[in-house]
Structures are given as structure tokens and as C-alpha cells.
Amino acid sequence: MDYTYLILVLPALIFSIWAQARVKSTFQKYASVRAGMRGVDAAQMVLRAGEVADVAVRPISGSLTDHYDPRTKAIGLSQTVYGADSVAAVGVAAHEAGHAVQYAKGYGPVKVRNAVIPVSQFGATLSWPLLMLGILLSSQKLMLIGILLFSAAVLFQLLTLPVEFDASRRALRALEDCGRFDEAELDGSRKVLRAAALTYVAALAVSVAQLLRLLMLFGGNGRRRR
């Protein structure tokens, strides 16, 4: 524990905890508001609006485990979303269908993000062991390599933000265009998606804070060696 942790990482962690709590509370609030359409129907509607015909919508176990898998071209909707006819379920399902439309349309930021996945995964796996080893051995070179690898993981999280925001934009536009929801229902889905987006912002904030802390420690260690 040092001052860099207190001024950089701890505030970001508190923000992340708050964001996670907010998305759960917002989902629970709008899970009790009926929308007249099930999650699975909302996902299929967004797919039709995006002229995507080769993506399946399947139920999966868990809560808030919803995702789109481009490898199998399948949208997985959790138990609280797939068959639920709530404002929250509609928003979440439409968002995941928005991801499917992104892939079908060749959305540029998705391609860029996917291109850095191997590097980011490699960096996320090896960065901290190299950093710890560098600190133990007082090796500036190992620490620098660890920081560079960690930076690749941070870059992936940064590239994720526009992808998530665009999926929500596509989802909300399709919900508005279908004409089956009133403004209150649309506003509820919008709030659910905004709360979910905050979790990605918070994750990036934590990683950026960690990166800044590492750079400060690296710089301080270098000055001490001189």
C-alpha cells in the first residue's frame, strides 16, 4: 500500500463497485416494469431490422450472463432476459442483438478490437508476473516489458467502449423504429443500457489508474537507481 494506490487505484475501484451495484439495481428496477415483448422477441426484432438472418437466439443459464458469440453466430440470453417481458429484458436483449448486427455489417471498431485480442490476452496473462519479477529483481527492463504488456490489455478495454456504445445505439434505434414502445418504456431501456455501459467505463478507469501507478513507480525506481 502506498500513496499512488490511494490517489489513483482506490478511487477507481470505488467507482467500479458503485457501477456494478448500479447496473444490478437498475436492472432489478426495470425488470418489474412490463414491456409487452419478451427479450427473445426484442433480439429477433433488432436482427430483422438490421437484416441479419443467420444468428440464433438461445436461452442460457445465469443472470446478466447475456452475450453474443460471433464464432457460433448465437445470442445467449440469460434466464432473466430470454423469456421475460420486462423493459430491462428488452433493453439487454436488444443490445446483444446490436452486437450481432455490428459483426454482420462489418463495423470497423469491432474489427480493430478483435485484431488486438491475441495481444491483449497475452499481455493480461504475463504482465503482472513480469512486473512482480522485475520488482523483486530490481530489473527496470522486466518492469518496462510488463508495463508494455499491461498497456495492451488497457488498449483492448479502451477499444471496447465505442463497440458497446454503438451496440446500445443500434438497439435503441430499432426499439424506437418498431413503434411498439412508449417513451417511458424506451427511457427505461435506455437507463438500463447506460448503467451497463458504466461498468465498461469503470473497468477502463481501474486499468488506466493501475497503468498510471505502474508508470509512476517505474519512474521513481529509475530515479532511485541513478
Image (tube, helix red, strand yellow):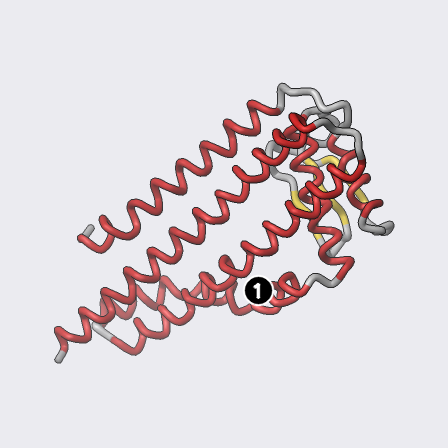
User: Residue at horizontal 32%, vertical 66%?
Assistant: 131
Say left or right for 194 vs 88. Answer: left
- Measuring from the top left, give residue 39's x and y in whole percent: 73, 32
Identify the image quadrant of residue 116: bottom right
Considering only vertical position in the picture, is 93 above or below 143?
above
- Measuring from the top left, give residue 43's x and y in whole percent: 76, 39
Q: Secondary structure at mark 1?
A: helix
Considering only vertical position in the picture, is 170 above or below 133?
above
User: What residue is shown with label 1?
Assistant: 117
User: Residue at horizontal 80%, vertical 36%?
Assistant: 178
Q: Amino acid at mark 1?
A: Ile
Say left or right for 89 vs 104. Answer: left
Identify the image quadrant of residue 154: bottom left
User: Residue at horizontal 12%, vertical 73%?
Assistant: 224
- Measuring from the top left, give residue 94's x and y in whole percent: 71, 40
Which residue is most to the front? 183
Q: Is residue 118 or residue 187 the one in the foreground?
A: 187
Considering only vertical position in the picture, is 33 above or below 12?
above
Identify the image quadrant of residue 124: bottom left
Mark 1 neighbour density, 10 Å: few (under 14) some (14–19) many (20 or more): some
Quarter of the C terminus within the rendering: bottom left
Total tally of numbered discs in the picture: 1
Say left or right for 29 vs 144. Answer: right
